[in-house]
């Protein structure tokens, strides 16, 4: 989702910028003179002319049409004769929403307490100071007094316990936990959750920058891995060339953490999750060629359900590799045992049991 352009000076109206007839607004990458794309709609379906000329696209002769931004810009105003107007250009221009929440860090932007950025290392950081200017969050020396690294733990789970400062995604939004919460719906329990950012659904005609967020057709929050990312469907991008699930990035940064899914009734197991089986159903490991090589999947039969005897089978013609042999039939968990199995995909046709 983009943001509606707001004039940086009070002498302009907030939604209808009054200027000289046929004047021009130029939009650049923040702090540069490199043109940056702007849009006619909030969903980035139609790029705007750049510069934008007053009086075009149905606007009055001395006004600009609606302009939607994608991040932070330097903006320059010139008259119809090409004369730069006093007070311009202006850096750090954003839209109506809070700036800097998931934008890439900029050394010429002054950040306030609570604003989020993506560092050049791909990690996310929260400003801990006001007037936070030119303190690169990827520099460990700036973690004291200016920035702290934050982690988005994944999609909200009603049975999970969250602490103050935890970040989760829910229904296309990014939320920060304001007080300890268990079973508090982020959409309604506003005393517990602060909505931080809207995440758009992936669109084949949209162009994404590196680290942009989107929601794929399966409802998974994914992160763009490259700039100029257009018409690369996140679903099926198992090599993570263009998109990577946010949950995977979190686990890569924190290998000691594991996401838990409580399962019953049989069905499919989930790669990159600890699958807790709560009954004696039959469960299938996903095909090994649908995930990158060395992807892990954990199956746990916890103490509460130790008397159950669920079965785990490979998909299609895949096999399980264990005890020096290939098993195509699957395994059944024993009674009266707490059991934990870790499966590692070979990316082709089998899973190694560790």
Image: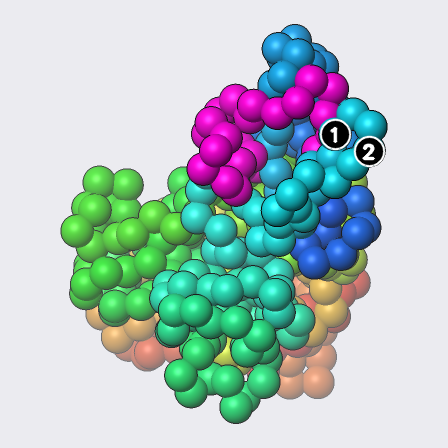
| Whether label 2 touches label 1, CB < 8 Å | yes
Residue visible at 79% across and 52% down in the picture? 33
Q: CA distance from mark 2 to mark 1?
A: 5 Å
Q: Is residue 42 visible?
A: yes
Residue position for label 1: 79
Residue 297 picture location, percent across and down: 55, 68
Q: Residue at x 28, y 41 (%)?
A: 187
**In front of the other: 313 or 175:** 175
Image quarter (top left, top right, bottom left or bottom right) of the N terminus: top right
Which label belongs to residue 239?
none
Q: Is residue 142 magenta?
A: no
| Image vertical order of residue 312 relative to residue 258, above or below | above
Give the quadrant of residue 145: bottom left
Give the crowd class for mark 1: few <14, some 14-19, many >=20 residues within 10 Å. Answer: some
Q: Give, as a single range, the part of the protein colored magenta.
A: 1-27
Figure quadrant of the C terminus: bottom right
For residue 53, side relative to residue 13 (left or right): right
User: Residue 332's x, y, as percent?
Assistant: 47, 67
Label 2 crowd bin: few (<14), some (14–19), many (20+), radius 10 Å? few
Membership of 15 in magenta stretch: yes
Residue at left 31%, top 67%?
Answer: 165
In percent of width and height, residue 110 lies at 50, 64
Q: In the drawing, what numbered circle is on residue 82?
A: 2
Q: Is residue 283 left or right of residue 62?
A: left
Q: Nearer the viewer, residue 27 or 218?
A: 27
């Amino acid at each position: 989702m983009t943001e509606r352009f707001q004039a940086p000076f009070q002498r302009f109206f907030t939604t209808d910028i009054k200027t000289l007839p046929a004047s021009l607004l130029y939009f650049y990458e923040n702090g540069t003179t490199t043109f940056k794309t702007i849009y006619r709609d909030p969903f980035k379906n139609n790029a705007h002319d750049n510069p934008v000329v007053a009086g075009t696209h149905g606007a009055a002769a001395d006004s600009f049409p609606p302009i939607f931004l994608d991040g932070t810009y330097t903006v320059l105003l010139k008259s119809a004769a090409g004369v730069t107007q006093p007070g311009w250009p202006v850096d750090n221009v954003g839209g109506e929403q809070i700036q800097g929440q998931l934008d890439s860090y900029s050394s010429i932007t002054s950040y306030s307490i609570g604003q989020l950025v993506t560092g050049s290392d791909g990690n996310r950081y929260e400003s801990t100071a006001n007037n936070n200017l030119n303190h690169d969050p990827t520099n460990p020396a700036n973690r004291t007094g200016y920035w702290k690294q934050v982690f988005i733990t994944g999609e909200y789970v009603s049975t999970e316990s969250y602490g103050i400062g935890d970040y989760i995604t829910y229904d296309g939004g990014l939320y920060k936990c304001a007080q300890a919460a268990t079973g508090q719906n982020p959409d309604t329990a506003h005393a517990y959750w602060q909505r931080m950012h809207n995440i758009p659904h992936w669109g084949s005609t949209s162009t994404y920058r590196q680290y942009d967020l989107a929601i794929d057709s399966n409802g998974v929050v994914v992160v763009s891995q490259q700039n100029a990312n257009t018409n690369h469907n996140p679903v099926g991008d198992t090599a993570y060339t263009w998109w990577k699930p946010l949950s995977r990035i979190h686990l890569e940064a924190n290998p000691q953490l594991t996401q838990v899914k409580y399962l019953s009734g049989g069905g499919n197991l989930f790669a990159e999750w600890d699958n807790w089986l709560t009954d004696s159903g039959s469960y299938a490991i996903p095909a090994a060629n649908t995930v990158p090589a060395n992807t892990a999947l954990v199956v746990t039969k916890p103490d509460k359900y130790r008397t159950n005897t669920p079965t785990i089978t490979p998909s299609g013609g895949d096999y399980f590799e264990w005890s020096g042999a290939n098993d195509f039939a699957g395994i059944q968990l024993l009674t009266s045992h707490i059991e934990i199995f870790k499966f590692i995909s070979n990316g082709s046709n089998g899973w190694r049991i560790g």
